Image: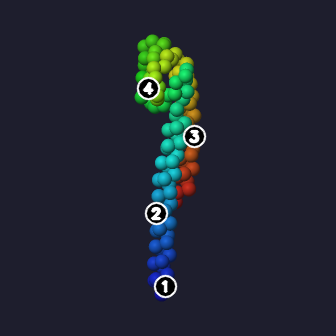
Amino acid sequence: MAFLLYTIVMTEEIVNQVKQATDYQKNKQALREKIVTELHMPFEGGLFHLTPSLMAFVETWPQEDLFLEDVYSNPIPINRQKFMDLARERYQSVMNDWHVKHQELKSVRKV
């Protein structure tokens, strides 16, 4: 009888651990989707999805003014320095927020 109770308790504990791990993965994915949305930045009438590759492209462009394709496939004239100043600030803010929230998710997970 004691063995049966022990087995039931252990099974419930395993189920709870699996559920927590699954919840963690779901919450982690939901957080990532939210962060991706926050990485969109309006600029000069366009909407840009900030990625390291986009920022590197703009940063290394040799001229100060250029046309950049936004998420709606529109060519938007931008000033490289103004764009980069806002992009860096936005990107770093969103990444910091993501890191803090991810750490919170990890601390809740006990698997």
Task: Tell me the number on the disc at residue 18.
Answer: 2
Give the mark, 1 or 2, whose residue is nearer the N terminus: 1
Dot placed on the residue nearer the N-terminal end, 1 or 3: 1
Gap between marks 4 and 3, in whole Å?
29 Å
Compute the Cα span from label 4 to label 1: 67 Å
Q: Horizontal placement of 55 versus 38: left or right?
A: left
Q: What residue type is labelled 4?
A: Ser
- Residue at image mark 4: 73
User: What is the crowding at mark 1: few (fewer than 14 residues within 10 Å), some, or many (at least 20)?
Assistant: few
Q: Distance between the residues labelled 1 and 2?
A: 24 Å
How is the model colour-coded? rainbow
N-terminal of the two: label 4 or label 3? 4
Q: What residue lies at 48% left-to-right and 87% top-to-bottom?
A: 1
Helix, strand or loop status at disc 3: helix
Decide which of tag 4 and tag 1 comes sooner along the chain: 1
Q: Which mark is residue 2?
A: 1
Residue 85 position within the rendered picture, expressed as x and y whole percent measured from the top left: 55, 22
Instruction: Check disc 2 and report its element: helix, strand or loop.
Output: helix
Read off the residue under disc 3.
Answer: 97
Q: Which amino acid does label 2 sit on?
A: Val
